[in-house]
Image (spheres, helix red, strand yellow):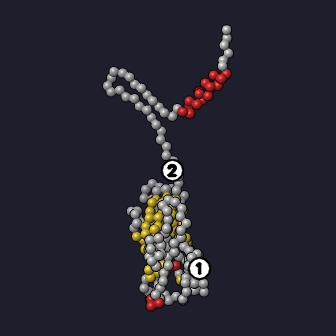
Amino acid sequence: MTTKPNNTFLKAALALALAVPALAHAESAINTGAGSPITASARLDFQITVPKVLFLQVGTGTNMAANATINQIAFSVPAANVGDGTVINATAGSGDLGNGQVTAKVVGNNGTITFTSTTLGALGNGSGDTISYADISTAVAAHTSATPLSHPALADASTTTVTLTPASGKVINRDAKWTYTYANTTVAAPGTYGGTNTNNSRGTYTASMP
């Protein structure tokens, strides 16, 4: 007497056979014998996926995350010192660190980074008078990284560039404390030059990585 295969059983067996390769990621071994020593080994494959990242902070920021805060660097020249060459420090509330000082940081993991600053033109007062960005100096001081982050100088209606190169491999992780001062070397017409995104007040820093 011939027994017909049970279709339900065959389907279940086929499903199990197809599933086995998908589950066979582990390995085991056994060794027996009277010798000394005896060994058994098993292997695993590991994988870590790291995305390409580029992070830039100038002023208030959240490490490795977006933050929309835009700081202002403001100078107030005393009447007795207008144009006399006395260097003017920024006001106490200027920058995330105060007194014209900001946190600057660039992190990238895919090689050389092109780092720029751009302005739309000289600072204006709305009445046709201007003060050049060349009169604003930036001092760079070490923060936490061994190599402080360089500052691309501010220039009127121009983009200036510094090139950041990894010491080895592809990773760049540099920061610094930048402090801005006003040279005050010329007598300027009265008025408020720049402001909040007005009269060419905004300088833009950009990092670019392949």
**Quadrant into which the C terminus falls:** bottom right
**Quadrant into which the N terminus falls:** top right
Q: Nearer the viewer, residue 188 or 167?
A: 188
Tag 2: Cα neighbours inside 10 Å, few (<14), some, or many (≥20)? few
At which x and y percent is residue 3? 66, 13
Residue to which mark 1 is pinned: 199
At which x and y percent is residue 88? 44, 82
Q: Which mark is residue 82?
A: none
Tag 1: Cα neighbours inside 10 Å, few (<14), some, or many (≥20)? many
Q: Which of marks 2 and 1 is nearer the N terminus?
A: 2
Reply above or below: 19 against 101. Answer: above
Q: For the residue labelled by badge 2, is the local secondary structure a helix, a strand or a loop?
A: loop
Q: Residue at x 50, y 89 (%)?
A: 187
Q: For the residue labelled by badge 1, is the local secondary structure a helix, a strand or a loop?
A: loop
At which x and y percent is residue 151? 47, 70
From where the camera sits, is residue 89 visible?
A: yes
Q: Are marks 2 and 1 in contact (CB under 8 Å)?
A: no
Q: For the residue marked with disc 1, what is the amino acid?
A: Asn
Reply above or below: 29 against 178. Answer: above
At which x and y percent is residue 107? 48, 60
Q: Residue furthest bottom?
A: 80
Q: Residue at x 47, y 70 (%)?
A: 96
Q: Which residue lies furthest to the top in this view?
A: 1
Q: Which residue is drawn at 52% across and 56% down?
A: 53
From where the camera sits, is residue 112 visible?
A: no
Q: Which residue is drawn at 41% across and 31% down?
A: 41
Q: For the residue marked with disc 2, what is the amino acid?
A: Val
Mark 2 to mark 1 CA distance (whole Å) = 42 Å
Residue to which mark 2 is pinned: 50
Q: In this view, does 105 lie to the left or right of 12?
A: left
